[in-house]
Amino acid sequence: MALLGAVGEVLSGLGPRLKPVFLVGPTGCGKTAAALAVAQRLPVEVISVDSALIYRGLDIGSAKPTAAEQQAVPHHLIDILDPLQSYSAAQFVADAQRLVSEVQARGRLPLLVGGTMLYVKALRDGISDMPPSSPAVRAQVDREAAALGWPALHAELQRVDPPTAARLHPTDSQRIQRAVEVYRLSGRPLSAWHAEAAKSPGVDWPLISLETEDRAWLHARLNARFDAMLDAGFLGEVRQLRARGDLHLDLPAMRCVGYRQAWEALDEADPPDLPRMRERAQAATRQLAKRQITWLRSMPDRTAVEAQAPDAPQRVLSLIQTLV
């Protein structure tokens, strides 16, 4: 009742705007279902915090909320870019801050939902004024990676920027590429840029995290979800993307987990070796979840909810009612 009363105050112009809330967690832990359950009880608009959902045409493999789900609850930062385009953490921060203000002005609760922890960190901690991307330098990095492999570029990063290298997997091509690019452009490591005074102020919005210590439970969910994606036509979706003729694996959109492995499998054969592709995609998804969990553990102020609890959505709802 307190939240509904606050909404009334906002609408009448007499009270403060509703405080935004993060709802985050590793992939496959039930964030979308929890957000939709919350939206059944509270005046919510969802702001996506997901680097795959921004792309049009990446629907099945990104577990994008369905058209019916998006119609039931207003969603933002979904389907805003063509897969040819790129999107940075700085762009996300600017878009998210704008959308939060717009949602608050409508007297509704901004619920930031997703698992792209780089976006979460950039918004919470602020983001430094980074050197702009250089197509020439990026192309050179890509050529070296094609010849030597991304682990070799990761080794270079270990020499020039140990803190950044320590948090990146040796095959995390997108982030290794950007870190090497920044160093070559500026002569300074990415970690030094991050340590400087932030260009954008950070935020202290409450952060709720759906988590589990039972990795077997999470892995089983991830495996079942990928099988469901295959049944829903995921390979056909990737074939459609390939048929455009202008997309390739160096694009951030095509590096998204699942899409990359399917693209590579179709490069090898069509129809692909399905068991091998499935194994690669599921392994990559598990690695993503592990990285997300590592990010979360670096955020001690989060409020964790057991993801596998039958009443997890209700627990999230109760927390939000006490936090905003």
Image: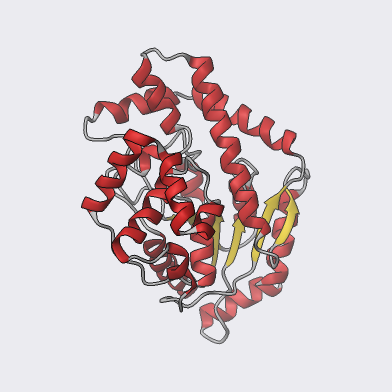
- x, y percentage for residue 13? 51, 84
| Label total for image | 0
The answer to which of 162 and 265 lies nearer the viewer is 162
Q: Residue furthest front?
A: 159
Q: Residue at x 38, y 66 (%)?
A: 188
- x, y percentage for residue 107? 51, 72
The answer to which of 70 and 132 lies nearer the viewer is 132
Which quadrant does the C terminus fall into?
A: bottom right
184 versus 155 height, above or below: below
- x, y percentage for residue 304? 73, 57
The answer to which of 241 and 132 lies nearer the viewer is 132
Which quadrant does the N terminus fall into?
A: bottom right
Q: Residue at x 45, y 69 (%)?
A: 192
In this figure, which colouring scheme has been used for the structure?
secondary structure
For residue 264, which quarter of the picture? top left
Q: Residue at x 51, y 45 (%)?
A: 69
Is 218 displayed left or right of 96 in the figure? right
Is 44 displayed left or right of 273 in the figure? right
Residue 114 in sight: no
Q: Residue at x 49, y 65 (%)?
A: 122
For residue 30, which quarter of the picture? top right
Residue 51 in sight: yes
- x, y percentage for residue 308? 75, 42
Is 101 displayed left or right of 299 in the figure? left
